[in-house]
Image: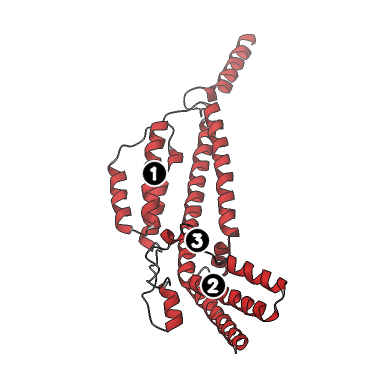
């Protein structure tokens, strides 16, 4: 009886120890799953932030090309109106305001290089010349990635993202490659993105090695810090003036620019009329 109970007890102990034998999950397995999930989530977030950054950058360029000349003309008219009022009144305060308005229109050193190719011989943007002469001009080049470029970019970012690397050499390789991917995407060049996809498919595949638990924890902490940095970047983009404009009309940003242009034309007409009255 005693022996039988001992045997039964031994059998029970063996049964309890069995999960630690072959086939039992490793202690790091759940942690590795968490790291992989965090990596993928971070990559998707980076893709979203980079896509929005490109949209903001392209919309900002188009905004400046289309509306910048009108804003500049408004500022010039405002300054001229203040100068005429100061000449008439002789008031030192009116003169101070006029001088401040004129000073704000002073050219910034080096700005000519930035405007190279967008100004004619008279120092006017093509858009400004059209506004003043009612002559048509070639519309500004729009760099807005198409659907194919977007899909290629997302696929490449998911496959080649540096955050998937565990070794420094592999991370450097991925960073250099993703830099080229980002540049092609910013240009909306689907052909170049296709070539990059072929290049990546033919390249060496990274080796994933098992990592200790402490390295996995460190990895999770790094991913969390990276997410915080990206969140700050996303918020800065969303809070910018251009980001706010995109939020107002996410489906038709061009239509929003047309509405603003109409408002600016009305303001220009008012300023021109006011200046004409002052000079009459």
10 Å crowding of disc 1: few (<14), some (14-19), many (20+) = many
Secondary element under disc 1, as helix, strand or loop, is helix
Q: How many marks?
A: 3
Q: Position of residue 8 (x, y in %)?
A: 60, 17
10 Å crowding of disc 3: few (<14), some (14-19), many (20+) = many
Residue 127, quarter of picture: bottom left
Q: Position of residue 275 (x, y in %)?
A: 59, 84
Q: Position of residue 274 (x, y in %)?
A: 61, 85
10 Å crowding of disc 2: few (<14), some (14-19), many (20+) = some
Determine which residue is flagged by label 3.
56
Secondary element under disc 3, as helix, strand or loop, is helix
Q: Report the residue at 55% width, 31% height from top.
A: 218
Contact, CB < 8 Å: mark 3 with mark 2?
Answer: no
User: Outermost residue toward the bottom?
Assistant: 280
Of labels 3 and 1, earlier in sequence is 3
- In the picture provided, is 240 more to the left or to the right than 152? right
In which quadrant of the rendered image does the C terminus lie? bottom right
In which quadrant of the rendered image does the N terminus lie? top right
Determine which residue is flagged by label 2.
71
| Mark nearer the viewer, 3 or 1 | 3
Secondary element under disc 2, as helix, strand or loop, is helix
Q: How is the image coloured?
A: secondary structure
Q: Is residue 215 above or below residue 112?
A: above
Task: Answer whether residue 54 is visible to the viewer in this image.
Answer: yes
Of labels 1 and 2, earlier in sequence is 2
Determine which residue is flagged by label 1.
160
In whole angstroms, how far apart are the C-alphas of marks 3 and 1? 24 Å
Q: Report the residue at 28% width, 51% height from top.
A: 195
In whole angstroms, how far apart are the C-alphas of marks 1 and 2? 43 Å
- In the picture provided, is 71 more to the left or to the right than 65? right
In whole angstroms, how far apart are the C-alphas of marks 3 and 2? 19 Å
């Amino acid at each position: 009886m005693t022996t039988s109970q001992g045997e039964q007890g031994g059998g029970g102990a063996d049964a309890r120890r069995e999960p630690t034998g072959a086939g039992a999950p490793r202690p790091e397995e759940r942690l590795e799953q968490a790291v992989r999930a965090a990596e993928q989530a971070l990559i998707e977030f980076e893709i979203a932030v980079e896509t929005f950054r490109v949209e903001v950058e392209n919309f900002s360029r188009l905004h400046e090309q289309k509306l910048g000349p009108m804003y500049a003309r408004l500022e010039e008219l405002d300054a001229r109106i203040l100068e005429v009022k100061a000449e008439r009144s002789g008031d030192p305060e009116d003169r101070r305001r006029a001088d401040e308005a004129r000073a704000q229109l002073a050219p910034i050193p080096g700005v000519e290089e930035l405007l190279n190719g967008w100004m004619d011989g008279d120092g006017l943007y093509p858009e400004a010349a059209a506004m003043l002469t009612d002559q048509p001009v070639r519309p500004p080049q729009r760099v807005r990635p198409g659907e194919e470029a977007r899909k290629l970019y997302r696929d490449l970012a998911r496959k080649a993202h540096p955050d998937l690397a565990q070794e420094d050499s592999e991370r450097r390789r991925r960073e250099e490659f993703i830099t080229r991917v980002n540049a092609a995407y910013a240009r909306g060049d689907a052909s170049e993105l296709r070539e990059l996809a072929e290049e990546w498919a033919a390249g060496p595949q990274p080796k994933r090695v098992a990592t200790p638990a402490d390295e996995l924890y460190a990895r999770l902490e790094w991913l969390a810090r990276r997410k915080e940095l990206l969140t700050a970047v996303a918020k800065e983009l969303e809070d910018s003036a251009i980001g706010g404009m995109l939020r107002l009309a996410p489906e038709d940003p061009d239509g929003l620019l047309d509405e603003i242009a109409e408002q600016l034309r009305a303001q220009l007409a008012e300023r021109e009329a006011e200046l004409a009255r002052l000079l009459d």
